[in-house]
Image (spheres, grey):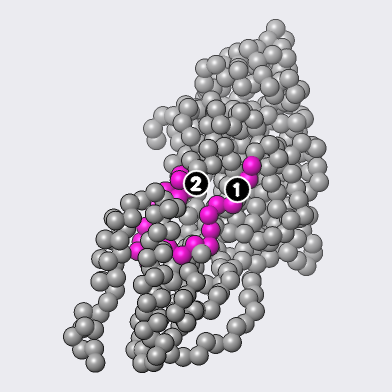
Amino acid sequence: MRSLKSLLISIIAVLLVLGFAPNAWAFCGFYVSKADAKLYNQASQVVLARDGDRTIITMANDYQGEVEDFALVVPVPSVIKQEQVHVGNPKIIERLDAFSAPRLVEYFDPDPCQPPPESKPIGGVTPTSGAVQEETGKSLGVTVEAKFTVGEYDIVVLSAKESNGLETWLNRNGYKIPRNARQLFRPYIRQNMKFFVAKVNLKEFDKSGYQFLRPLQIAYESKKFMLPIRLGIINSQNEQDLIVYILSPQGQAELTNYRTVNIPSNTEIPLFVKDEFGDFYKAMFQKTYEREDKKVAFLEYAWNMGSCDPCAADPLSREELKEAGVFWLDPDALANTFITRLHVRYTRDKFPEDLIFQETSNGQLFQGRYVLQHPFTGEMKCEAANNYQQYVRDRQEQELQTLAQLTGWNIRDLRRKAQITQSKSTPFWRDIWKP
């Protein structure tokens, strides 16, 4: 693995004119593909399970580098005890990502020569030992409030009177943090927050048998519903992606100090996007991000965990939700867990504050959903066929226009690509043997 010495981020749908119109399907459909966190090179993921003032946070470690260089510094509202810390299962974050990822679905036009079916209601289912070196820190204004080992992590909880002393203490005790970290420590010290600091116990890591670092989970109580992201800006001047999964019994969660914008959704796009959905979603996200002046959070998914429509993955089971930190489950139902997926792309200048959330009772459902609508390709012998064929041509042109608007891609290039795709999908004998 290449060496990368870094401080991980702190938590880190055409109206038809000619008389034919297909039925509307709401959310149901055939799931094709998804745009998950793997699309992004530097996407950090955090799970916040919160009810009232109680929170369990799960921080995924996408660290790339030598494990002995790993350091995690997280501002926390109070002193964290050993029993409040747990080493989690990385597959849980993968499951949340798969379940809530923006999705591509496809539908197939019915035979325009057949009467439409009756509509049905939609349902939804550094020291090599890893030990922390002792130092009183009195002269630096740093106090070790707690010290313990959980799984493969050695953890200390610190309080500090000033940022220079905290930076010095961390450096002297083998934590490989970036230079000049002190400037981003200051606001947390002013708020009298503590610092949860973790590094790898190499002996315990070797014993664990895991190839990668597992996520850390912290349980705490605080009236503040926030996520410190400013420390993550230390790592890079470039844009960073953060995906936050908020689990709540109330409904959607939202940001209070930045706008939350729904990602463009429920749009019909050309069929050839099926083979390049990842490229489409990344281009669309970047275009929307720039249009919003790069300072909003995007809602990618909001749904009750008891169902999904269409499902990009099965809902999490009761045991999986518990592993994700959900502690309020009813004995007989999963329906009281709501998942909100927020995607934040941030930089130092556009996000000068940490993320502050609030729980709401808004149970409105939303998902990033993109539709492939296949034309009917069977034999058509009726008066409606000509109208339908014109409708399809108009629809396909609109799909290309929509794609160009969402992504900024050149419309002429898209038309050429659509012509190639359509010619490949038409049987070579059709023009020879048609009546």
Quadrant of the image for the N terminus?
top left
Q: Is residue 277 magenta?
A: yes
In this view of the protein, which residue sits in the foreground, 190 or 280?
Answer: 280
In the rendered image of this protein, does residue 334 appear above or below residue 52?
A: below
Q: Residue at x 80, y 42 (%)?
A: 53
Q: Position of residue 250 (x, y in %)?
A: 77, 54
* Placement of 86 over or under 404, stated as above or below: above
Q: Which residues are magenta?
A: 259-287
- In the image, 204: left or right of 223? left
Q: Which mark, residue 261?
A: 1
How many other residues sit within 10 Å of disc 1, few (<14), some (14-19) or many (≥20)? Answer: some
**Toward which corner of the image does residue 356 lie, by quadrant?**
top right
Identify the disc placed on residue 288: 2
Residue type at numbered disc 2: Thr
- Calculate the distance from the C-alpha at mark 2 to the C-alpha at mark 1: 10 Å
Residue at point 63%, 12% (across, down): 164
Q: Is residue 7 visible?
A: no
Q: Percent from the top left, x then y, of residue 63? A: 49, 36
Pointer 2 with pointer 1, Cβ within 8 A: yes
Q: Quadrant of the C terminus?
A: bottom left
Q: What residue is drawn where x is 39% and y is 49%?
A: 408
Residue 251 x, y percent position in the rendering: 73, 55
Mark before the other along the chain sequence, 2 or 1: 1
Q: Residue at x 63, y 76 (%)?
A: 122
Residue extending farthest to the top is 139
Using a 10 Å C-alpha cutoff, classify the residue at mark 2 as few (fewer than 14 neighbours), some (14 to 19) or many (20 or more).
Answer: many
User: Is residue 3 toward the left or the right of residue 170 in the image?
Assistant: left
User: Would residue 122 be visible to someone looking at this image?
Assistant: yes
- Mark 2 lies on a secondary structure that is helix
Give the amino acid type for the residue marked by disc 1 in the picture. Answer: Val
